[in-house]
């Protein structure tokens, strides 16, 4: 029997209707649907509610929402790798492989096993305080060091491995994975990279200098970012969803983790086709 974990986004108005379609589909098959107990109550599906859903075994998980919903679910499954498939209910849905008009068709392919899993590396973020390193968390798209004070630019030093690379004034710095190359890094002028390419992207945010440009480094390289002006404050954000305040003398370290997130993909969806339809459809 298949076990399918469902993670619905509460904000999207069409969520209930899509969830009802999913329930109808799996109720006619040898499959078990599970939702977090809180979500099950909110949608009137108490019989499917479970506790600690991310720690229970599942064949795959369905994300009902946009890319942000899918990223959050992947982070929840970081220590219990369950492949996640996105059902697009956002404005872009770059990572989701199922559109609402093809829902039942793609659910059938999931039941048949007619899909493949792309194992994308997590970025791991750390902060060193008074000589002790503390784990901040995982991110799939990016880890961003940015200003805590909206009115100021900040002075940052960037080191790769043990080599001081550059000092600059900017609104911040993005360390992105190839998966995250089409997210914040793209908006800041960074390159687009196929998510299966091994590497990291360093992208300054509104740098107040002409001598720094986005840089692609090796997957095994380690990035260190520190604040140069002790009068300023900065924050670190993981995938735009989890934020930590960083204090003067702290050092933020970002490196590629051995932990992987499983993203379900179908053979009829090509990465470059997705680029064309999602990013350049109005060109």
Image (cartoon, rainbow, N blue to C red):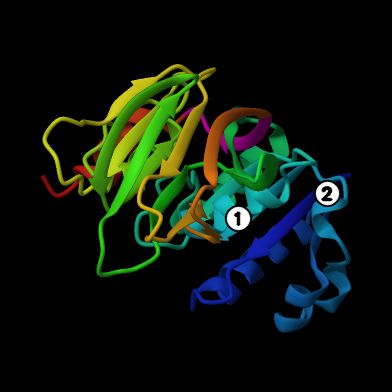
| Of residues 30 and 115, the one drawn nearer to the viewer in this rendering | 115
Q: Secondary structure at mark 1?
A: helix
The kind of secondary structure the magenta stretch mainly shows is strand
* Residue at 37% over, 60% down: 232
Position of the N terminus by quadrant? top right
Image location of residue 105, percent across then percent down: 56, 46
Residue 139 sits above or below residue 26 on the image: above
Q: Is the Cβ of the residue at disc 1 closer than 8 Å to that at disc 2?
A: no
Whether residue 260 appears in magenta in the rendering, the answer is: yes
* Residue at 57% over, 61% down: 64
Locate residue 119: give its quadrant.
top right
Residue 218 sits above or below residue 97 on the image: above
State whether residue 270 appears in this view. Answer: no
Q: Residues within 10 Å of mark 1 (few under 14, many from 20)?
A: some
The residue identified by callout 2 is 3
Q: Secondary structure at mark 2?
A: strand
Residue 151 sits above or below residue 189 on the image: below
Please provide the residue range marked out in magenta.
Answer: 259-267
Image location of residue 246, percent across then percent down: 52, 56
Is 52 displayed left or right of 140 in the figure? right
* Residue at 54% over, 17% down: 220
* Residue at 43% over, 48% down: 144
Is 201 displayed left or right of 240 in the figure? left
Mark seen at residue 48: none
Which-is-in-front pick, marks 1 and 2?
Answer: 1
Image location of residue 234, percent across then percent down: 43, 58
Image location of residue 251, percent across then percent down: 53, 42
Mark seen at residue 72: 1
Whether residue 115 appears in magenta in the rendering, the answer is: no
Locate residue 118: give its quadrant.
top right
């Amino acid at each position: 029997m298949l076990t399918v974990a469902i993670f619905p986004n509460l904000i999207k108005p069409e969520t209930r209707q899509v969830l009802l379609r999913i329930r109808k589909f799996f109720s006619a098959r040898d499959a078990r649907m599970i939702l977090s107990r809180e979500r099950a109550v909110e949608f009137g599906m108490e019989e499917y509610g479970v506790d600690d859903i991310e720690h229970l075994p599942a064949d795959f998980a369905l994300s009902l929402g946009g890319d942000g919903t899918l990223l959050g679910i992947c982070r929840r499954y970081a220590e219990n790798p369950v492949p996640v498939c996105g059902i697009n209910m956002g404005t872009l849905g770059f990572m989701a492989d199922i559109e609402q008009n093809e829902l039942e068709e793609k659910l059938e392919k999931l039941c048949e096993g007619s899909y493949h899993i792309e194992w994308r590396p997590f970025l791991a973020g750390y902060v060193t305080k008074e000589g002790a390193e503390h784990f901040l968390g995982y991110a799939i798209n990016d880890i961003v060091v940015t200003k805590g004070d909206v009115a100021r630019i900040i002075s940052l030093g960037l080191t790769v491995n043990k080599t001081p690379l550059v000092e600059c004034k900017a609104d911040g710095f993005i360390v992105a994975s190839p998966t995250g190359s089409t997210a914040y890094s793209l908006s800041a002028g960074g390159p687009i990279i196929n998510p299966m390419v091994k590497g990291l992207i360093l992208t300054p945010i509104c740098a107040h200098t002409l001598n720094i440009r986005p840089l692609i480094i090796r997957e095994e390289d380690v990035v260190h970012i520190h604040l140069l002006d002790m009068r300023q404050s900065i924050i670190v954000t993981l995938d735009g969803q989890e934020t930590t305040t960083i204090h003067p003398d702290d050092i933020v370290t970002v490196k590629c983790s051995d932990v992987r997130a499983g993203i379900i993909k179908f053979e009829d969806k090509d990465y470059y086709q997705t680029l064309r339809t999602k990013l350049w459809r109005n060109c």
